[in-house]
Amino acid sequence: MFTSNQPECHFSLVLISLLSCTTNQARLTVSPSSSQVFEYDSVTLSCEEEDSSAGWTLWRNGSKLHCRGQMAKPTRCHISNIFTWDSGVYWCESREGPISNMVNLTVTGGSVILQSPVLPVMEGDDVTLLCKTKTTPSNLPAAFYKDGSLIRKQPTGHMTIQHVSRSDEGLYKCDISGHGESPSSWITVTDKHTTTPLIPVLSCVGSFCVVILLVLLVLLVRRHARRKPEAQNTDDTSENKVTCTEVTLSNHQQKQKESDPAGLYSEVTIQDVTAGQKRKGTAAL
């Protein structure tokens, strides 16, 4: 029994290896870790990859990033003087298809920025926002806004949101009196159980379903193939039974004729339902 199932096990393993989704991931990091930077500042973008063989590269706004600064490899770009037109959405992408997290980087020519988390914030964590100017100390009093509404004013220029929840998602900005207002940045809050991007997960689920369906199909074909010999054996047995019945009827008919010289028994036709053929026998009148 183990020998008969062995080819099915090998076939299932081959299917799983062919259709399994990739688990290699990369994470885009920005240094300094802020979604807003001043123009002419230096910024380093890098893909922290688990597998360098996946061929990760930096992308911006739908195109491969052509780093005009120092690039050690396609997964790292250091820009010593960043400009406002460098603003955009950045991510890492592999030649196999998966992409990393996305970072919306804003480069401003103004005098105030809001330093907020680059990556999504886990639900329940604490988040600190810092409102800073380009030339003066960063501990000036500042007002913080969410979705255009004032949250609070802080005398030291930074605000901490404790135990963030989904309701804390939104557009944040700050204002320092006499210096100006920062651009707005979106803060994303994710569930603590969400550890992988949505697209790879769906890909894995889809591949797993395909594997299960193919394995079930193979099992059904093999089961149907096994039933054919059994059906043929059953037909052979029925034919043997009919042959035996025919012989028995012939012997019985001969005996009846010998014991009934007057012909009290007449010949009738008996139909064998199992074999679908007609057989002759005798019956008493």
Image (cartoon, helix red, strand yellow):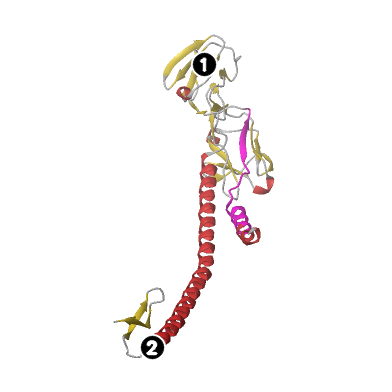
Tell me the element at label 1: loop
* Kind of residue at disc 2: Lys
Q: Would you say residue 19 sits in the magenta stretch?
A: yes
Identify the mark nearer the N-term, 1 or 2: 1
Residue at (55, 43) in percent of width and height: 200
Viewer-proximal residue, 146 or 25? 25
Viewer-proximal residue, 186 or 61? 186
When the figure is inspected, residue 236 is found, relative to residue 34, above or below; the finding is below
Q: Is residue 126 left or right of residue 283?
A: right
Residue reaching furthest to the bottom:
261
Residue 32, given in percent of the width and then of the height, sits at: 63, 27
Tell me the element at label 2: helix
Residue at (49, 18) in percent of width and height: 174
Residue 226, given in percent of the width and then of the height, sits at: 54, 66
In which image quadrant can residue 81 be found?
A: top right
Quarter of the N terminus within the rendering: bottom right
Residue at (53, 42) in percent of width and height: 201
When the figure is inspected, residue 227 is found, relative to residue 101, above or below; the finding is below
Residue 124, given in percent of the width and then of the height, sits at: 54, 22
> How many angstroms separate mark 1 from mark 2 (CA)?
128 Å
In which image quadrant can residue 137 be found?
A: top right
Q: Which residues are magenta?
A: 9-32
Viewer-proximal residue, 115 or 109? 115
Query: Circle 2: is it few (<14), some (14-19), or many (20+) Cα within 10 Å?
Result: some
Query: Circle 1: is it few (<14), some (14-19), or many (20+) Cα within 10 Å?
Result: some
Residue at (49, 11) in percent of width and height: 153
Q: Which residue is mark 1?
A: 179
Q: For residue 257, which numbered disc appears in the image? A: 2
